[in-house]
Image: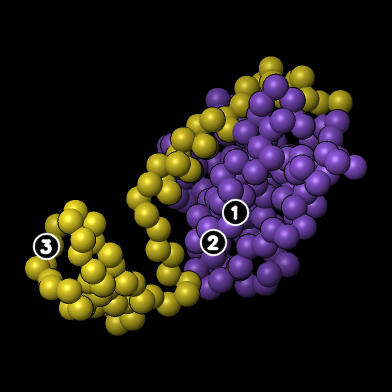
Chain colours: A purple, B yellow
Amino acid sequence: MNQTFTFPEGLLGFEEVREMQLLPIDVDFDATFYELVSEDEVVGFLLVDPFKLHPDYKVQLNEEIKEKLNAEKVEEIIVLTMVTLNDSLSTSTTNLKAPLIFNLAKQKAFQWVDSSPEFSLRQPLVSSAREGK
Amino acid sequence: MLVLGRKIGETIHIGNNIKVTISSIDGDVVKLGIEAPKHVPVHRQEVFEEIRRENQAARFTKSQLKNLKK
């Protein structure tokens, strides 16, 4: 997957960025990572597939989300979360509160603000349970 | 901005399916009861500020990326 997505609403703090490219990257950590970069490469984020890291995580794909993305089928949609890097990935966090939702078919994306209070803006990539293993 | 005066227990309607009721007033704290369809997001303003800050903290540079790549 190496695709350019339109963010019609921009991202909070980066409202001027409307086109970003999503590409998989190979990182030495047990998860699936992507790089999201603006066309001029000035703005970049590291994204992760949150479902493998946090099996309890879920995003309710409601009508508003489907409408925003012009999604006809749920299969068109993928959900990734932003990683805030610390010294290493094992001490880094990801933002489960505001996932990025992509429509692969229409190449549109936006940041969803989840109403559920249980998901953190700074969820460690390595949960304490995993550390114990 | 439209400003409406309301008493405790009184309600305003926004469109056909959103209702905001003044639930209680205690000093400078007003509690609002909000009835809206499930798909209409309702958030405190602070949530957006937090996400803005976290997005800015999550922005990364090419050199950070190089260090991560296998």
Residue beneath disc 3: B3
Same chain check for tags 3 and 1: no
Name the residue located 32 percent from the left edge and 72 percent from the top edge. B33
- Asked whether the residues under the numbered discs 3 and 1 touch, taking CB atoms below 8 Å apart as contact, a structural biologist would say no
The reply to whether residue A39 is visible in this rendering is: no
Q: Chain of mark 1?
A: A
Chain to which the residue tagged by mark 3 belongs: B
Give the alpha-carbon distance from disc 3 to disc 1, as whole Å. 34 Å
Marks 2 and 1, how far apart in space? 6 Å
**The C terminus of chain A sits in image quarter:** top right
Snapshot quadrant of residue B6: bottom left
Front residue (pair A116, A80): A116
**What is the CA distance from the residue labelled 2 to the residue labelled 3?**
30 Å
Amino acid type of disc 3? Val
Chain of the residue under label 2 = A
Disc sitting over residue B12 in the figure? none
Q: Tell us which disc is closer to us: 2 or 3.
A: 2
**Any mark on residue A119, and which?**
1
* Labelled pair 2, 1 in contact (Cβ < 8 Å): yes
Residue B68: where, in percent of width, then height?
78, 25
Disc 2 crowd rating (10 Å Cα; few below 14, some 14-19, many 20+) is: few
Amino acid type at image mark 1: Phe
> Residue A116 at x, y = what percent?
54, 61
Numbered disc 3: secondary structure = loop
Which residue in the protein does label 2 denote? A116
Q: Is residue B4 left or right of residue B16?
A: left
Quadrant housing residue A123: top right
